[in-house]
Image (cartoon, rainbow, N blue to C red):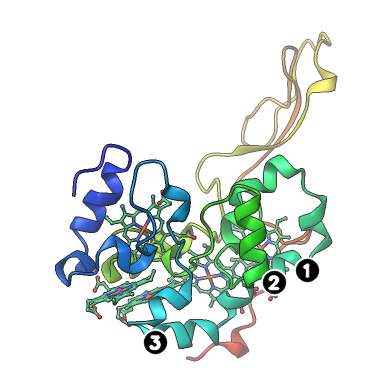
Amino acid sequence: MPSAVTPQIVSDWQLSKHSQMGVQCFVCHGEAHRTATDFANAKIPTPETCALCHAQQVEQFKSGKHALAWAAMKAMPTAHWQPMVLMEGMKGCGGCHKIGLKSEAEIAELKKTGAGFGVASCDACHTRHLFSAEEARQPQACQTCHIPSFARSLPTKVWWDWSKAGQDVAEPPKDQWGQKLYDKMKGEFKWAKDVVPPIFGSTAPPRDTSRETP
Ligand code: HEC
Ligand code: HEC
Ligand code: HEC
Ligand code: HEC
Ligand code: HEC
């Protein structure tokens, strides 16, 4: 199966259980795409595509919280305040919340706006086209979206005001990590270390251990 356009997709698939078991491209993408120019005819899989063979996993996924992620994002005014360039193509909020189930109408809308992907959900933890259970068992599979804290060892800029640039400050002030808070060329900064990502301007609520199984 030679491919000039998507060689990595083919080589990933070749390493997969699907390839071993004869689950070929057309099983998930349909048979309508035949030539180099009619790729628009390829079907983009949804969890229903996988349900054909993995009914139990799809059932479990649908009854879990991940299935609600898309609806939860769309319900927030903050999602609609984002500039389009930050939202299109599953950037911004969609980078993580694409894991949720979408309606037929939402899928059609996404296709119209040019996002030819992001409707599968199932490839969030065992990524396409390897679809490996081993990969999904690694903590990193979850960390792409669940980030307990960032900038753990080195502080990072979390605020930057360009409009303050151009002033002559003899001795720019420094913060507790020794980072300069001002630079004539660049303006004013704030730095932070070991930051817990805020959810809507608030930090995560304190951990409720009473909800955890011992
Ligand atoms: C035509 C049937 C078929 C379809 C459709 C299908 N699979 Fe599979 N899948 C299999 C078979 C067969 C295996 C190997 C046996 C097993 O592990 O259940 C497998 C295995 C897997 C595994 C485990 C691989 C491993 O490392 O053990 C994952 C993950 C997976 N499939 C995900 C998916 C996802 C996601 C979709 C939809 C996008 C999908 N499959 C669609 C047949 C299918
Ligand atoms: C593509 C991004 C993404 C990946 C990868 C991901 N998650 Fe999630 N997860 C989310 C989002 C978004 C939510 C919030 C959904 C909602 O509540 O609407 C969530 C919610 C959860 C919740 C429910 C939390 C609560 O407060 O109820 C658990 C538990 C969870 N994820 C565990 C995992 C585990 C374990 C993995 C890895 C095996 C994982 N997730 C991988 C995006 C992701
Ligand atoms: C880096 C990944 C990521 C990004 C980007 C992201 N989220 Fe989330 N979001 C999550 C995770 C993970 C959770 C679940 C947190 C938990 O329960 O511990 C969540 C939870 C939520 C919830 C609560 C859902 C519930 O059922 O309680 C809403 C609403 C939400 N996010 C909306 C948004 C919006 C709007 C944006 C963009 C402005 C956004 N998210 C960006 C990962 C992300
Ligand atoms: C087990 C089901 C399955 C099989 C088999 C499969 N794919 Fe996919 N493919 C997917 C899923 C799931 C997506 C992601 C859809 C989404 O995110 O909405 C995808 C996306 C794609 C995309 C567009 C996004 C990207 O990754 O660039 C291309 C191109 C593609 N597949 C080509 C192939 C080719 C070529 C083969 C055969 C070598 C193949 N697929 C086999 C499930 C499959
Ligand atoms: C939040 C991450 C995540 C999502 C989303 C996800 N999976 Fe999985 N999947 C896993 C993990 C982790 C394993 C390995 C489980 C184990 O080893 O016990 C797995 C294993 C599998 C397997 C191998 C057999 C088994 O059950 O262990 C199949 C098949 C599979 N998933 C299909 C799917 C399908 C279909 C979807 C979409 C409906 C999906 N998965 C969505 C994390 C995920």
Q: Do labels 3 and 2 touch, CB within 8 Å? A: no
Report the label total: 3
Viewer can see residue 196 = no
Q: Are marks 2 and 1 in contact (CB under 8 Å)?
A: yes
Tell me the residue that label 3 is attached to.
55
Q: Position of residue 112 (x, y in %)?
A: 64, 52
The front one of 96 and 168 is 96
Crowd class of label 1 (few under 14; some 14 to 19; many from 20; radius 10 Å): few
Three-letter code for the amino acid on which mark 3 is drawn: Ala
Residue at image position (64%, 73%) is 103
The yes-or-no answer for disc 2 within 8 Å of ligand 2 is: yes
Callout 1 secondary element: loop
Judge by depth and name the residue closer to the eye, 192 or 25: 25
* Amino acid type, mark 1: Ala
Rendered-image quarter of ligand 3: bottom right
Residue underneath mark 1: 75
The residue wearing badge 2 is 71
* Residue 203 location (% of width, % of height): 72, 62
Residue located 32% across and 38% down the image: 5
Left or right, 192 with reference to 52: right
CA neighbours of label 3 inside 10 A, class few (<14), some (14 to 19), many (20+): some
Image-based side of 145 in relation to 164, left or right? left
Which of pointers 1 and 3 lies earlier in the amino acid sequence? 3
**Ligand 3 is within 8 Å of the C-beta of the residue at disc 1:** yes
SS category of the residue bearing label 3: helix
Task: Judge: label 3 CB < 8 Å from ligand 5.
Answer: no
Q: What's the residue at 64%, 29% (across, down)?
A: 179
Q: Amino acid at mark 2?
A: Ala
Q: Is residue 78 left or right of residue 70?
A: right
